[in-house]
Amino acid sequence: MIPRELFRKIRHVEVRTRGLVDDVFGGEYHSAFKGRGIEFAEVRPYQIGDDVRTIDWNVSARTGEAYVKLFEEEREQTLLLVVDVSGSEDFGSARAKRDLAAEVCAVLGFSALRNSDKVGLVLFTDRVERFVKPKKGKRHVLRMLRDLYAHEPVATGTDLGVALDHVLRVQRRRAIVILVSDFLVPTASHEALAKSLRVVSRKHDLVAVRLVDPREETLPSVGLLRVVDAETGQEALVDTSSAAVREAFADRAAHRAARAEHTLKRARVDHVTLRTDEDYVEPLSSFFRHRSKR
C-alpha cells in the first residue's frame, strides 16, 4: 500500500510531467534520441540511382530482375534511468535534489512511454540499491516513480563507477542511459570515473544530468553554523560571518563544479546542469533541441 501523502505527490508529479510531455518534451525526446539501428522493411525493383550494395541477390536470382532491400530506422529503444540516491541527494534549499531528480525522471519516463520505448531504473549509492528491468506501460513508469520517492537507501556514500559497471552487466543491447547525480565525488575518483563514463558511452547513448543546489555554491552570513556531511556524517563548526571563510567555500564549490564539467567533457558525455532553485523545463528543453540539431 502507498501512503496517502506519497500517492498524492506521485499523482501531482504525474499530472504535471505528462502535461509537459504533451506540450513540450514528447517530440523533443523523439528528436534527441533517434534510433540508431536499422531493420529490414521490404524489397522492391531496382531503380536507377539505387546503391548497388543494397541489391538482394537471392530475390534477384529467383525473379530474373534486380531487387533492392529497403531498411527503416529501428525506433523502439530502451531508456535506462540511473539515479543517485546517496545522502547528498536529500539536501536542498529550495527543494531536495532527489525530488528534482524524480520529477525529471518522470518527464523522461513518460516521454519514452509516448515513444513506445521500454524504461528501466537503477538506484545507487556506493552500491546498486535497486534495479527495475526495462518494460513498457504507464503502470510500470508509475511504479518506478514510486520507487524514486519511497526507496530508503541502505548506504549514504556515492560510487558512480559501481552504477556504470552495473549498467554494462545488465544492459547488453544499446540503450539511452541517463545518469542523474550531483557528481559530488572526491577529486581522486575523477580519473576512474572518466574511464567508466567513456566505456559506457561507447556502448550506449549516455547522457549526464548534474544536479546543483545554491547552498552548495555559497554560504550565507549567519554567524556560527554547524554543518554535517550527509554522506560521511562528519560535523564541523563554520564561522559564516567571516568573508574569508565564505570566499574559500565558494572557491572550493567552483573548483568542484569545474572538475565535474571537465570529467564529463573529457569522456565526451553530453550533459545538462539543473538547479533546485530554478525551473528545469527550459534548460532540459534547450538541451534536447541542441542534441536534435546535432
Image: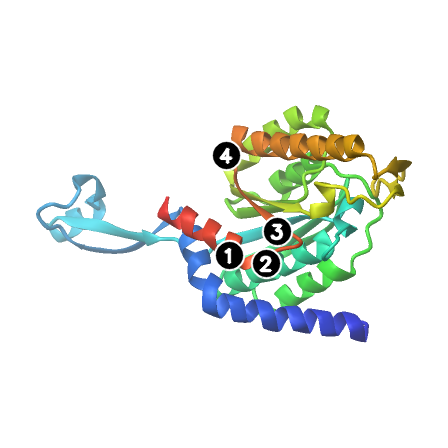
- Point out the tag, 4 or 2, that comes first from the N-terminus: 4
Residue bearing the label numbered 1: 282
Type of amino acid under label 3: Leu
Type of amino acid under label 2: Asp
The residue carrying pointer 1 sits among few (fewer than 14), some (14 to 19) or many (20 or more) residues within 10 Å by Cα, namely few
- Point out the tag, 4 or 1, that comes first from the N-terminus: 4
The residue carrying pointer 4 sits among few (fewer than 14), some (14 to 19) or many (20 or more) residues within 10 Å by Cα, namely few
Distance CA(mark 2)–CA(mark 1)? 7 Å
12 or 240, nearer to the observer: 240
Residue bearing the label numbered 4: 202
In the image, which disc is placed on residue 110? none
Q: In the rendered view, does 98 fall on the left or right side of 71?
A: right
Type of amino acid under label 4: Arg
Q: In the rendered view, does 102 fall on the left or right side of 91?
A: left
The outermost residue toward the left is 48
Circles 2, 1 touching at the beta carbon (< 8 Å): yes
Distance CA(mark 4)–CA(mark 2)? 31 Å
Residue bearing the label numbered 3: 81
Res. 135 image quadrant: bottom right
| Kind of element beneath mark 4 | helix
Distance CA(mark 3)–CA(mark 1)? 20 Å
Identify the residue shown where x is 90% and y is 36%. 236
Residue bearing the label numbered 2: 279
Circles 3, 1 touching at the beta carbon (< 8 Å): no
The count of marks equals 4
42 or 119, nearer to the observer: 119
| Kind of element beneath mark 3 | strand
> On screen, 248 above or below 48?
above
The residue mark sitting in front, 4 or 1, is: 1
